């Protein structure tokens, strides 16, 4: 899935690898961005009401629905299974919120400061707190733990094995990839050196990132 403005309007588009068919999921004159997909559900940011809201499309049923349309921007959606999470700015300071699609219940994690960039795996949410802390929240137990405090961090992601992020502990010009490994319960380096490593993503036992050690950005 992706955001597309080829027809002078914004749309969310889906490409089916089996049928090799492209489909417009949602279209309109206002911005539709940050599309995320998991199994048969697609979530995205939608500005049709004047500020950004979170919308959902079910591929199986062909139906579109609003997940969150509160005041202020609801942004940066993430989806895994029945959980959709986003950064919710209805109070003027973003908090992490999530909906359990099986119960339609929405929960907001009201914390001081700025909470952004949620990512979801199963019943776990990882997010960025005040730009310096990586936080892991367990939906089932409602427990929360700080995985990595301190220096500037960006772009968290989470998988079965643990959480990854871009880490600036060596300075703003030298980001590295760090991981909190849930098997060994430790913060460990993944990619480091005198060059830029950013935009990590994790799935099962593999981690990918962008890296400019050769002068160009490669994966």
Image (cartoon, helix red, strand yellow):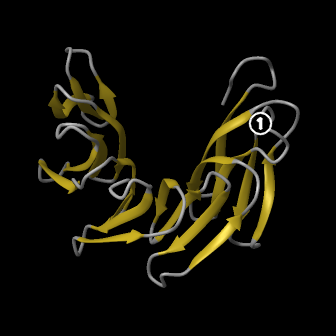
Q: Residue at x 21, y 53 (%)?
A: 69
The residue beneath circle 1 is 172
Q: Indicate whether 98 appears above or below 19.
A: below
Q: Indicate whether 111 appears above or below 191.
A: below
Left or right position of 117 against 131: left
Residue 16 visible in the shown view? no
Q: Residue at x 73, y 36 (%)?
A: 197
Q: Residues within 10 Å of mark 1 (few under 14, many from 20)?
A: few
Q: How many marks?
A: 1
Left or right position of 32 against 26: right
| x and y, in percent, of residue 38 in the image | 36, 52
| x and y, in percent, of residue 94 in the image | 44, 55
Front residue of this view, candidates 74 and 56: 74
Q: Residue furthest right?
A: 194
Residue 193 visible in the shown view? yes
Left or right position of 100 against 133: left
Q: Residue at x 81, y 26 (%)?
A: 213
Instruction: Give SS at disc 1.
Output: loop
């Amino acid at each position: 899935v992706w955001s597309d403005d080829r027809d002078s309007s914004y749309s969310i588009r889906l490409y089916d690898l089996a049928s090799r068919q492209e489909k417009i999921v949602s279209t309109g004159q206002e911005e539709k961005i940050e599309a995320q997909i998991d199994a048969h559900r697609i979530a995205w940011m939608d500005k049709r009401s004047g500020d950004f809201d979170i919308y959902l499309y079910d591929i199986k049923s062909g139906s579109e629905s609003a997940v969150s349309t509160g005041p202020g921007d609801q942004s940066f959606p993430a989806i895994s299974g029945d959980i959709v999470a986003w950064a919710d700015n209805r109070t003027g300071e973003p908090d992490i919120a999530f909906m359990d699609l099986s119960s339609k219940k929405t929960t907001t994690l009201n914390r001081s400061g700025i909470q952004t960039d949620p990512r979801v795996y199963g019943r776990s949410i990882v997010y960025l707190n005040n730009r310096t802390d990586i936080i892991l929240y367990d939906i089932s137990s409602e427990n929360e733990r700080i995985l990595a405090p301190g220096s500037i961090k960006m772009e968290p992601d989470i998988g079965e094995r643990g959480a990854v992020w871009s880490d600036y502990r060596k300075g703003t010009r030298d980001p590295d990839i760090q991981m909190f490994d849930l098997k060994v319960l430790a913060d460990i380096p993944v990619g480091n050196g005198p060059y830029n490593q950013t935009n990590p993503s994790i799935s099962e036992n593999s981690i990918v990132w962008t890296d400019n050690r050769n002068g160009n950005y490669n994966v």
